[in-house]
Image (tube, rainbow, N blue to C red):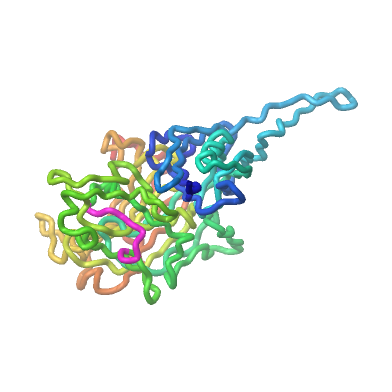
C-alpha cells in the first residue's frame, strides 16, 4: 500500500469554506517532516476568537481523500488566579495551547512542510491525526499560524486568454508593510524605497503562483488556466503568457466528448478554484470544454503590500478574442466579498486590431483602460460605481503590441493615481466626508 503522497490545505479566516470551495489560501504541502506532514508559517493575522474554516485533500494510492467543512477557533486565554506571598491576585494565561500576542501555536499530529503562502492557521490534532491515519502512521509536529498585518493587495498578471508579456514588476514608495515567502521586510531609511523587483531572468515560483482552474475568472472566459511552460515562460528577461488551443493537446473530439480534470495529483498541479465547476468539466455539445488553454499568475505566494507605487513594463498581444489584464486584488477580503474589498485594474486591453464602439471610439489593441472597483455589495451593481473611477486612453499612433509601455499605480492613504509611460491618466481621491453612494 502506498503512503499518503501529499496534502493540500484550503482555508479562509473568518469566512465560510463550503465543501471543496477554494479558500482564500491554498497550500500544497510538498514533503514530510519525519513521519508527518507539517504546515508551518509565521506572522500576525490571527487573533484570539478568530475562526479558521478549511478542508484538506490527501492523495493515497492515486485517489484523493477529503476532509471537508472543518473549522478551528483560535483559543481565547482564560485568566487563572495565582497566589503570591502578599496574597495579591495576579493572572496568567493558560499554558496550552499558548497564544502569545497574535501568534497561535497549536501542537498536534502535524501536516507537512512549509510553503510560500502568505497567511496562517493552526489545524486541530484530531484532523491531523485523520490525515496521518490515511497512510497508517502517525507522528507529532507543531503548526505555527500567523501572518503579516496591513497587507491588502496582490498583483495578478495575465487574465483572459492573454499573451501579454512583461518585465520588472514592482517598484517602491511604500510604507514597508509587505510580506512574502522568505522575504524580509525591507529596512527603509528613506522614501521611495524599492521593496520588490522581478526582471524575469527566471520564473520565480516562490513568488508567482499559477492559478489552475476552468472557472472562467469571474468573467466566463473561454480559457482554462494551467501551470504549463507552453503557456507561461521566461526568455531574455521577458515573461510570456501565451494561449494555445485545447484541441492541440487533446484532439478535436475532446471539447464535446472529453473530461477536463484539473484536480491534479502532485504539488504545483492542484486545482486552485472549484467555483463554477472549475476543477472538473465534462464536455458536451451544449456545454463544451473550454477551447483555450492559457496562464494566469498571482504574486500572493511571495509578495504583497499596502501603499506604494508599482510599475510594470508590458507589451500587449495582438489578435481577436484576446483580453490581457494586470490587476491588483485583495489578499484578504477585509471588508467583505467583491467589490466591497476593492480591486485595482492597472490595465485592461483587447487584442483586436480593428475594433471600435458604435460611436467610433477605438476599443482594440491601440487602447486600454484602468479602473477601480469598490462598494459594499455585489447584489446592487450601482454599489460598484466603477464608471466614476475609470479612464480610457487611445494611442495617437501605433498599438500597444508594437513595443513595451510602462503601466503604473501610485497608492497612498489619500488617493490612487494611474500612470502610463510616467504620465498621469487618472487620480481618484475620496472627499473628506467620504462618498455618498446615492450621488454617484
Say which residue appears at 40% left-offset and 45% top-offset. 63
Vertical order, 398 against 3 (above or below): below
123 relative to 384 in the view: left or right: right
The mark tally for this picture is 0
* 402 horizontally vs 201: left or right: left
**Relative to residue 289, is residue 27 drawn left or right?**
right
The one nearer the camera, 351 or 174, is 351
Residue 392 visible = no
Measured as percent of width and height from the top left, residue 437 is found at 32, 36
Q: Residue furthest bottom?
A: 236
Location of residue 300 in the rendering, given as x and y in whole percent from the top left corner: 45, 53
Q: Quadrant of residue 92?
A: top right
Residue at 59% in and 36% down: 125
Q: Is residue 138 magenta?
A: no
Q: Is residue 227 magenta?
A: yes
- Secondary structure mostly seen in the magenta stretch: loop
Residue at far left of view: 358
Quadrant including the C terminus: top left
| Front residue of this view, candidates 184 and 428 | 184
148, 108: nearer the viewer: 108
- Hey, which quadrant is residue 184 in on the image? bottom right
Is residue 17 depicted above or below 243 in this figure?
A: above
Residue drawn at the location 86% of the way across and 27% of the way down: 84
Depth check: 154 or 244 in front? 244
Q: Residue at x 43, y 43 (%)?
A: 24
Residue 110, relative to residue 351: is it above or below? above
Q: Residue furthest right?
A: 85
Q: Is residue 110 visible?
A: yes
Locate residue 297: give its quadrant.
bottom left
First to last magenta residue range = 222-231
Find residue 334 and report its horizontal and vertical position in percent: 45, 40
Amino acid at each position: 500500500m502506498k503512503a499518503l503522497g501529499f496534502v493540500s490545505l484550503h482555508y479562509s479566516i473568518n469566512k465560510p469554506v463550503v465543501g471543496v470551495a477554494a479558500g482564500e489560501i491554498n497550500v500544497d504541502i510538498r514533503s514530510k517532516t519525519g513521519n508527518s506532514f507539517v504546515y508551518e508559517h509565521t506572522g500576525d493575522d490571527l487573533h484570539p476568537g478568530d475562526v479558521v474554516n478549511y478542508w484538506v485533500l490527501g492523495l493515497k494510492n492515486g485517489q484523493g481523500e477529503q476532509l471537508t467543512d472543518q473549522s478551528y477557533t483560535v483559543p481565547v486565554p482564560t485568566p487563572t488566579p495565582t497566589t503570591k506571598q502578599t496574597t495579591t491576585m495576579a493572572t496568567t494565561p493558560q499554558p496550552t495551547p499558548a497564544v502569545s500576542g497574535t501568534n497561535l501555536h497549536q501542537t498536534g499530529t502535524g501536516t507537512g512542510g512549509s510553503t510560500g503562502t502568505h497567511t496562517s492557521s493552526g489545524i486541530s490534532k484530531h484532523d491531523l491525526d485523520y490525515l496521518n491515519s490515511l497512510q497508517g502512521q502517525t507522528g507529532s509536529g507543531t503548526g505555527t499560524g500567523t501572518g503579516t498585518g496591513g497587507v491588502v493587495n496582490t498583483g495578478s498578471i495575465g487574465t483572459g486568454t492573454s499573451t501579454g508579456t512583461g518585465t520588472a514588476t514592482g517598484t517602491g514608495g511604500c510604507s514597508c508593510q509587505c510580506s512574502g515567502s522568505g522575504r524580509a521586510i525591507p529596512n527603509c531609511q528613506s522614501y521611495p524605497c524599492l521593496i520588490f523587483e522581478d526582471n524575469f531572468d527566471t520564473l520565480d515560483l516562490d513568488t508567482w503562483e499559477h492559478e489552475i482552474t476552468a472557472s472562467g475568472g469571474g468573467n466566463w472566459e473561454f480559457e482554462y488556466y494551467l501551470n504549463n511552460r507552453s503557456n507561461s515562460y521566461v526568455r531574455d528577461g521577458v515573461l510570456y503568457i501565451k494561449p494555445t488551443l485545447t484541441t492541440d493537446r487533446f484532439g478535436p473530439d475532446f471539447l464535446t466528448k472529453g473530461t477536463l480534470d484539473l484536480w491534479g495529483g502532485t504539488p504545483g498541479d492542484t486545482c486552485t478554484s472549484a467555483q463554477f465547476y472549475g476543477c472538473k468539466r465534462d464536455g458536451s455539445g451544449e456545454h463544451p470544454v473550454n477551447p483555450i488553454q492559457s496562464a494566469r499568475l498571482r504574486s500572493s505566494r511571495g509578495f504583497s503590500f499596502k501603499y506604494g507605487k508599482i510599475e510594470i513594463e508590458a507589451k500587449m498581444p495582438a489578435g481577436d478574442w484576446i483580453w490581457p489584464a494586470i490587476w491588483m486584488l485583495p489578499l484578504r477580503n477585509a471588508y467583505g466579498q467583491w467589490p466591497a474589498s476593492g480591486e485595482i485594474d492597472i490595465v485592461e486591453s483587447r487584442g483586436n486590431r480593428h475594433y471600435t464602439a458604435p460611436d467610433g471610439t477605438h476599443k482594440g489593441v491601440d487602447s486600454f483602460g484602468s479602473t477601480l472597483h469598490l462598494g459594499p455589495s455585489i447584489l446592487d451593481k450601482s454599489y460598484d460605481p466603477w464608471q466614476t473611477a475609470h479612464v480610457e486612453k487611445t494611442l495617437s499612433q501605433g498599438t500597444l503590441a508594437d513595443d513595451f509601455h510602462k503601466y503604473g499605480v501610485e497608492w497612498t492613504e489619500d488617493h490612487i493615481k494611474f500612470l502610463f509611460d510616467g504620465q498621469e491618466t487618472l487620480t481618484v481621491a475620496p472627499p473628506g466626508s467620504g462618498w455618498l453612494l446615492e450621488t454617484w
